[in-house]
Amino acid sequence: MTRDTIVPKLLDLAARKFDRPRDGLSAEQDLFDALGIDSVDAMTLLTALETEFKVEIPDYEVQDVRTFIALAEAIERRL
Amino acid sequence: MLAAETYSSLGALLSDALVQWKRETALIEIDRKKVKRELTYRECMPEVARVASFLSKTLPTHTNREDAHLSPSAPRVAVLLGNQSRWLLAACAIFRVGATLVPIDYKLSAQEQLELIAHAKADLLITELPLARRFAAPPSCPILLVDGEDSKANVHTWDALPDAEMPPLVERAREDVATIVYSSGTSGRAKGCLLTHGAYLAQLDALMAIFPMRPGHRTFSILPTNHAIDFMVGFIGPFASGATVVHQRTLRPEFLISTLEEHAITHMAVVPVLLEAFERAIDERLAKRPAWQQKAFNFLTTVNQALTRDAVRPELSRKLLPGVHDAFGGKLELIFAGGAFVDRERAERFHAMGLPVVIGYGLTECCTVATVNDLRPFRANSVGAPVKGVELRIVHPSQDGVGEVWVRGETLMRGYLDEPGLTEAAFTPDGWLRTGDLGKLDASRHLQLVGRSKNMIVSPGGKNIYPEDVEGTFAGIEDVSELAVFATGYIWPARESLVGEGLFAIVRGDIERAQLVKELELRNRKLPEHKRIASFLETAEEFPRTASMKLKREVLAAWLREHVRPTELVRLRVAEKAEGALSL
């Protein structure tokens, strides 16, 4: 699986989890802005992603992440 | 509890702690739900000995710095680590060999971290692989990695250090510098506060008298340990008392909660944004209960509030409200809130549920805290009374008693590293630190903070924000001729507290209101949440400027105070929450 296949799944899951329209989300967006979430919400998103992609992502790997695409890259590195 | 007043250095105190509490558990480190490391105080000794021995062989014996008088010839060791047991073991070793500790915030960018390490002229860096990997070019000093392997020259690994005898204690005097702690300054100008052994020992003495710890207590270290509150509540305090420090390698809420539940946490220090997350978790659980249970919960909360008004009674609160206490592990006694201002209603609600939130007030410049609320009784509207060893006065008070807060005492820093000008400006000739915060003392001499005499705000996550730093983002809007950003609390000190501080822009131009709102909101989105402006004000007045066209900020601020009411500000749409990247 590559980031190109990860991104749509990631956006689906984020839209579902935070009840946002899927159409409004895209890879390059700032995920905090697009979802209207805070850092604590983002941590719960991370856990949901780990379950979805069956990976374990340490906190330090996402410390500087702000966009969906960067998050997808962090997942890709762990697959 | 070791008697802090009998010691002259942290090195001596921590060395005695390892002997005194030998059978007690010192450290528990957890990754998600797995316990990775568990050490008694006795078991800490060989680890500390190995690192201390390595330091004494690796560090220069003499340094020729101009500021050497601050701590005679003491070498400096920077620690850049996430919260983990080896942070504290490294610090024990550093103090054992009489070196100065330079704690670096692991949440800063790699570039900022390198700048601080260079600014401190660190002789050695102790860090971990995930953080070291972020450096474009590593610092020139030797590096000790606490994990992994690295074959590069000048890089050593903790696990490869040979077993060694504990090197002899290098004693320091109380007035010697123990740590250089960086406080966030405007425009990236780093300010390293030189904090002495005496400052920490005096704070330890004062805080443990109010909130004693003992063997069996378990502190959950969540705030970065470079943070003044966690350094005391999550390290020095528990070690001096034989209590246990628990670290969790992830900060995800579900693992914070599982750690609270499974490891019987009694104390923890948090930033207000985390307190808010805990409150949300409680409300979500409560919302799933039937209406009668919700009513019963609210009733019992009121009963508990009445019975604990004058003093905390953890056993009673646990019996009355077992549901909420069990969610926090059932043993939690105190939550220390620091770094930013705590919402008064939230603090009151936690206290009503029998989960007392200790609110204090401090700056990096004065060690841990200058004032603290002793919970006897709980006062949500105040940041507490000055702690032992700290003098506090309100300078040039207005008619309603509000003036600048000044503090003095052994807990104050010696100055800013390599910044004699800034140091001189921070202190009065007779040793008072000008905090730049505005406050008043109530009838019982408890401090209420109401504003700032500095143009800045503190975000809910504890970051200092200077309006000048964000002005650039709003430059170049078409048809706007002038724009400046101010902190609301600086222009209009509040009557009650500093909760909900915000930034606003004053704008002069020939632009439609709707267009201006659109432009400001567009630019706001480029900034992290905590740096966004919350509102704006239009004016036809030209901004006061110097001959070289530099903005006379103070004159404009005075004009705003005189001519504008805060109710005249036009609010922008700003998401209510969020701070920075994926970290708390």
Image (spheres, coloured by chain):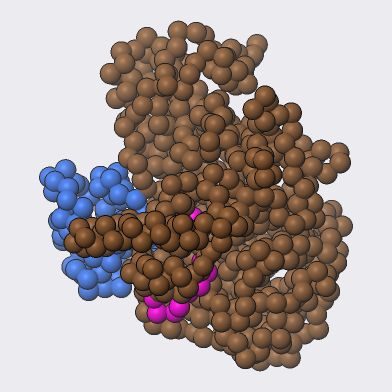
Chain colours: A blue, B brown
In the picture, residue B58 is in which quadrant? bottom right
The N terminus of chain B appears in which quarter of the rendering? bottom right
User: Is B134 part of what is drawn in magenta?
Assistant: no
What residue do we see at 62% from left, 78% from top?
Answer: B214
In screen coordinates, is B457 left or right of B178?
left
Q: Position of residue B316 (x, y in %)?
A: 46, 70
Residue B262 or residue B169, whichever sits in front: B262
Residue B566 lies left or right of residue B491; in this view the side is left
Give the vertical position of B417 relative to B155 (above or below). Answer: above
Q: Which residues are magenta?
A: B260-271
Res. A41 visible in picture: yes
Q: Is residue B144 above or below residue B346?
A: below
Percent position (x, y) of residue B264? 45, 78
Q: Is residue B104 visible?
A: no
Residue at 60% over, 41% down: B448
Image position, residue B567 (x, y; %): 42, 21
Q: Residue at x 71, y 86 (%)?
A: B20
* Residue B89 position within the rendered picture, expressed as x and y whole percent measured from the top left: 62, 77
Q: Is residue B397 left or right of residue B39?
A: right
**Number of callouts in the render?**
0
Looking at the image, is B260 positioned above or below residue B392? below
Query: Relative to B264, does residue A26 appear above or below in the rendering?
Result: above
Residue at image position (81%, 83%) is B168
Picture quadrant of residue B98: bottom right
Which residue is nearer to you in this view: B88 or B482?
A: B88
Residue B267 within the segment the image draws in magenta:
yes
Quarter holding the C terminus of chain B is: bottom left
